[in-house]
Amino acid sequence: MTAVQSVHTGRSSVPWLALGALGVVYGDIGTSPLYAVKQSLEAAQGAGDLHAAVFGVLSLIFWAVTIVVSLKYVLFIMQADNNGEGGILALMAKAMQAKPEARGRRIVIVCAAMAGAALFYGDAIITPAISVLSAIEGLEVVAPQLESVVVPSALVVLIALFTVQARGTSAIGLFAGPITGIYFLAIGALGVQQLIERPDVIFALNPLYGIEFVVTHPHIGFMTLGAVFLAVTGTEAIYADMGHFGARPIRLAWFALVFPALTLNYLGQGALVLAHPEKSANPFYLMMPDWALLPMILLATMATVIASQAVISGAFSITRQAIQLGLLPRMRVLHTSHQESGQIYLPAVNWMLAIAVAWLVLAFKDSSALANAYGIAVTGTMVATTIIAFYVMRDVWHWPLWRVVPVTFAFLAIDLTFLSANLLKFAQGGWLPVVTGAVLMLIIATWREGREILFSLRAAGAMPLDAFIASLNVNSVHRVGGTAVYMTPATDSVPSALLHNLKHNRVLHERVVMLTVRTEDTPRVAEEQRVSVEPLAKKFYRVILRYGFMEKPDVTEGLAACDKMGLPIDMMLTSFFLGRENLVPSVHPRMMLWRESIFIALNKLSQSAPDFYRIPADRVIEVGTKVEI
């Protein structure tokens, strides 16, 4: 991520971390004023009464932001951190730490997390497209004849953004906070300017105006709620990025600058429309003087690039977490910074996102059309977060039901209301994140189920390790010098690579290490808990390396730590034996044949174990076996 490391020392660092959080955490929600009021007023225009529509929309936006962002996420959900890390997968891991034996509970949590993570990718596709398009559409206000250059200009900006990902995002991260801070100050000042002309619009903060609008115009009001939700898109980033800045800086940035600036700008847009109804077509850009128009287009474009960068980086981060937690196949992960471990680049994810975003811009062509596709992905993720938070409250925090149920019900009622309102836009583009999420859910579920089948097949044919060692006749088996490391997911059984090596070569190394790499339900594992070494009989050793779901496994580095535990390992005298399984469809498949084919394809595309675990390629011996699944 383009963020400061999650090491927060001393009070003096909090303001600086808050400044950094402005760009990374609030870039997405900060660009909502570009289109939220415009889309909401367009949805509410059938009400007839302009005053009631404006006051109703402003009231709904303000209270949506207050309840969903301030109360639910900033003040409540951020308390559910997993050793300082946030995000739906971190929340899943935290919830799974309690009652691991409860299978039904585990299924609900995993399914909710899988759905939320899958829908996040829909958000990651739509956010760059709608944000950059809405910013560049300001050119149409400058000169209507420039409409034809909006789409090409947006594509140029977006392609440049995806191209620079491979070089790291430190440059963007350096300026993200200050630029976004200037942007928030500017939009707040523009709102104040309009409020001076129509100070009465401040009464729209009364929740009764929003309630009255929805009750008086139920159908139009419900559709308007779907557009109002655009004001809170990007909220998940507040929780997902907390590990990079900490809760206090994020809360400081929100209440000290972001929330006031957004509120003032929304009120200012409403005041402008009340005074000049003809400017409702694009109140964000039409509320500023002519001299400020081009500078604001440039500033808004930079802000949307920063917002898009945050979402792209978030996609990289959640993909790495999903890989570590076994939800996705191994992919190539590149670190783009020697100082910040959070700055990573996944080529496959980057270019899939780039292609999808470019297609969106070409297919929808303007932000208004894309707005219909936006809300479902975000609301779906919010529902999933609330469901998992229920288990955290109940089983991790040990809250009594009389506290858990009202809190969960209140949040779910709001989330499901917004989700229902956004589902009305399914045919107009809302299908896009649903289809994207469904495809990714299928991939995640197929990968998980395929791996479970594969593990069960291994376990069924495996020999117990203790029995194998006991049966070895040291006089009849030739032992050669050096160390052999056999990677195995099961600590108590013999890996097939060892059996095949013994069968074909009839030798064992002087020392045999059974190595298991585990991903724990915590973001990071303390170095003193990283390695465990258990000596077995006949110079066999059981070694377990533990990593958090935010860490990159490094077997070479991990084995080097065995020296302190009485097992010195010289890499120049060590060979790694890895099983390479050639998966083929079974005559009696354990999954539907088409899903089986997907799993086999995913397994072939998965990054090789030596590359993923950072094992020296010249020390690896792969033993192939055919496996029917």
Image (tube, rainbow, N blue to C red):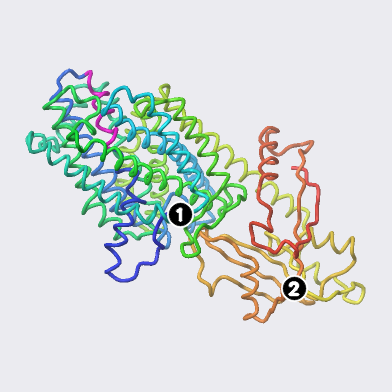
Boundaries of the magenta span: 33-46
Residue 366: percent from left, percent from top: 37, 27
In the picture, measured across the screen, residue 617 lies left or right of residue 306, that is right
- Using the image, determine if residue 5 lies above or below residue 627: below
**N-terminal of the two: label 2 or label 1?**
1
Mark drawn on residue 90: 1
- Using the image, determine if residue 502 lies above or below residue 596: below
Mark count: 2
Which is more toward the observer, 266 or 358? Answer: 358
In the picture, measured across the screen, residue 264 lies left or right of residue 349, that is left
Residue type, numbered disc 2? Met
Residue type, numbered disc 1? Ala
Residue 623: percent from left, percent from top: 80, 56
Q: Which residue is mark 2?
A: 572
Q: Residues within 10 Å of mark 1 (few under 14, many from 20)?
A: many
Which is more toward the observer, 452 or 155? Answer: 155
Q: Quadrant of the N terminus?
A: bottom left
Residue 416: percent from left, percent from top: 35, 35
In the picture, measured across the screen, residue 264 lies left or right of residue 382, that is left
